[in-house]
Amino acid sequence: MLPTLLILTLATTVSAKFNPLHHSGPASPYFDAPSQFGIDVETPENCVVDQAAYILRHGSRFPEPGSLSGWQTLYTKIQNASFTAWGPLSFIGSWVVPVDDVDHQSPSSGAYLSGTGAREAFDLGVDLRKRYGFTRGGDNFTAWSAVQQRCVDTTTFFVRGYLSHGNYVNDTKVNRGTIITLPDSVNTTFADSLTPSASCPAYDDANNGSAISNAYRSLYQERVADRLNLYLDGLVLDPTDIGVMQDLCGFSNEINGDKRWCNLFTEEEWLDYEYAHDLNYYYGSGPGNALSATVGYPWVKAISDIFTAGPGNAISNGSLVTPPLIMGFTHDNNIPPILSALGLWNTSTTGVYPLSKTHRRADRTFRSSYVVAFRGYVALERLTCSAVDVSRPVYHAANVIMAASGEQSTYVRVRVNNAPVPIPACQGGPGATCPLGDFARYLGWI
Ligand SMILES: *[C@@H]1O[C@H](CO)[C@@H](O)[C@H](O)[C@H]1NC(C)=O
Ligand SMILES: *[C@@H]1O[C@H](CO)[C@@H](O)[C@H](O)[C@H]1NC(C)=O
Ligand SMILES: *[C@@H]1O[C@H](CO)[C@@H](O)[C@H](O)[C@H]1NC(C)=O
Ligand SMILES: *[C@@H]1O[C@H](CO)[C@@H](O)[C@H](O)[C@H]1NC(C)=O
Ligand SMILES: *[C@@H]1O[C@H](CO)[C@@H](O)[C@H](O)[C@H]1NC(C)=O
Ligand SMILES: *[C@@H]1O[C@H](CO)[C@@H](O)[C@H](O)[C@H]1NC(C)=O
Ligand SMILES: *[C@@H]1O[C@H](CO)[C@@H](O)[C@H](O)[C@H]1NC(C)=O
């Protein structure tokens, strides 16, 4: 029997190029999504970003109490049995639940950020300061956060990364960060909430998404359990154990660096796992929910108004001077509505949408791993571009920092987990950007 098992092991090894962490949906630690549309990630030539707005999911975290209890059940089941395991499963008798201080990691009030999540947030702060150069040393900076602790903590680490230059860490009187927290459930109007999923009574972000996704899971989990049970004698994995084991790849990686669960499944099994998540978000909070675009619209419209005013201008009768960088930190279910409001990832000429409930297509662009990974985001950038004639020489007058020359126009670009994404109805600008005026008109008609 053993030689057969060894051959099986070889046959199921995931190819070196395939990374399960890039196909783990909401359990994926942050990674830059690949460009699905062939657009260069660099800002187009002769353009500068002069204003940007991000709406993000919090960083990598510990499991929610519900997930944790699933992990504990699996652990108890394994430990309670006397069994023999071969090959890829030989580690499971030594596996322990990677939550070692429940009260400070996964309390019933909600899971906290992990060290990986804190680093993801800090890194983004450093990256955005360098990317845009908006905030001079000594300036203040304000960020907005949903009220749950892991969102506030993500914001805090972001602000530290964004403002940590010079002696800020030692001298708290310079580079001050302010965090404004917004309650989850209120009678909100427009972008006064970062969790509009909780403030529209008619909107249900489950919307049968989890039922559809569970129905898809039932199509493959039994097959996976049957395959893995060949490596066990004295312990039988159930189809429902498979989802827990696949979740543990992403979570163990970011919590304690344990990669053993990642090596257990084939590429096809990872793609099915990812697709089950895709269905959950597509039909739950994304374009497959008829109210999703409505829920995402206020944030997009508010940013459109702010971009139309441009950075540093007073709006709302002088009550707000538009900041150059607007950061909003929230939860996974509040990100897909932004895609819906912008009309992204839901059009094709080949009938990919609405996503099939039973058949995974490789040519879909809607991928949960590419947007609701931990610290995933949708960013809007306002670009000012000059029509520069490169054949003409440029003249620099002494002691005058050169300003952009040539006729200037403004555009909007969308980036999702770093990758530029065109707005299907509006992509005539440089680098498939949308002219700002058209963007504002487009939103006006939704
Ligand atoms: C532990 O194993 C025993 C004997 O196989 C079984 O009766 C019992 O239900 C198991 N308990 C758990 C929590 O799995
Ligand atoms: C930063 O905020 C503080 C407190 O509101 C204010 O006194 C200070 O002038 C601000 N600094 C800048 C550079 O705007
Ligand atoms: C930090 O600030 C304190 C108080 O102003 C000062 O004594 C100390 O030298 C500073 N440390 C550094 C590393 O700048
Ligand atoms: C929202 O507004 C309605 C109508 O004014 C009111 O009955 C309700 O209590 C409010 N809800 C919250 C959470 O403030
Ligand atoms: C929800 O999805 C399940 C699985 O696809 C399906 O059986 C059920 O009819 C759906 N219910 C609604 C209300 O759409
Ligand atoms: C997504 O595409 C489907 C199929 O064309 C359509 O029924 C649905 O309304 C679209 N959703 C959004 C938010 O545009
Ligand atoms: C601005 O002020 C005008 C005149 O007082 C008022 O009618 C309008 O509602 C105000 N707009 C906003 C956005 O506050």
Image (cartoon, helix red, strand yellow):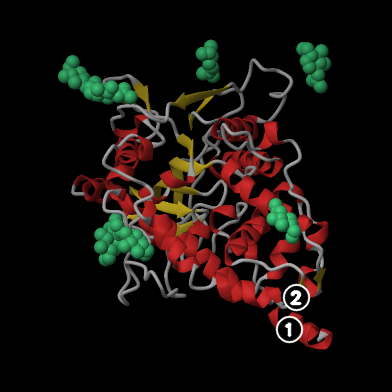
In this orientation, which residue lies closer to the viewer: 135 or 196?
A: 196
Amino acid type, label 2: Tyr
Location of residue 414 with respect to 5 vertically, above or below = above
| Residue displayed at 31% across by 54% down | 289
Q: Nearer the viewer, residue 106 or 314?
A: 106
The answer to whether residue 291 is left or right of residue 382 is: left
Tell me the CA gap for discs 2 and 1: 10 Å
Inspect the image, locate mark 1, and give the three-letter code of the amino acid beneath it: Leu
Q: Quadrant of residue 94?
A: bottom right
Res. 433 visible in picture:
no
**Left or right: 424 in relation to 174:** left
Q: Pinpoint residue 224: horizontal percent, then vertical percent.
A: 61, 73
Along the viewing direction, whichever of 334 and 35 lies nearer the viewer? 334
Task: Give the camera-side residue of 104 and 348.
Answer: 104
Q: Which quadrant of the render holds ligand 6?
A: bottom left
Q: Position of residue 323 (x, y in %)?
A: 43, 30
Q: Secondary structure at mark 2?
A: loop
| Residue picked out by circle 1 | 8
Q: Which mark is residue 350?
A: none
- Which residue does the image show at 45% across and 68% down from the upper left? 216
- Where does residue 60 sit, x and y in percent of width and height? 62, 45
Above or below 375: residue 420: below
Mark 1, ligand 1, within 8 Å: the answer is no
10 Å crowding of disc 1: few (<14), some (14-19), many (20+): some
What residue is rendered at 25% in x and 45% in y?
Answer: 440
Above/below status of 143 relative to 68: above
Q: Which residue is mark 2?
A: 231
- Residue 338 position within the rendered picture, expressed as x and y whole percent measured from the top left: 37, 48
> Contact, CB < 8 Å: mark 2 with mark 1?
yes
Q: Left or right? Give the position of 348 relative to 233.
A: left
User: What is the quadrant of the N terminus in the image?
Assistant: bottom right
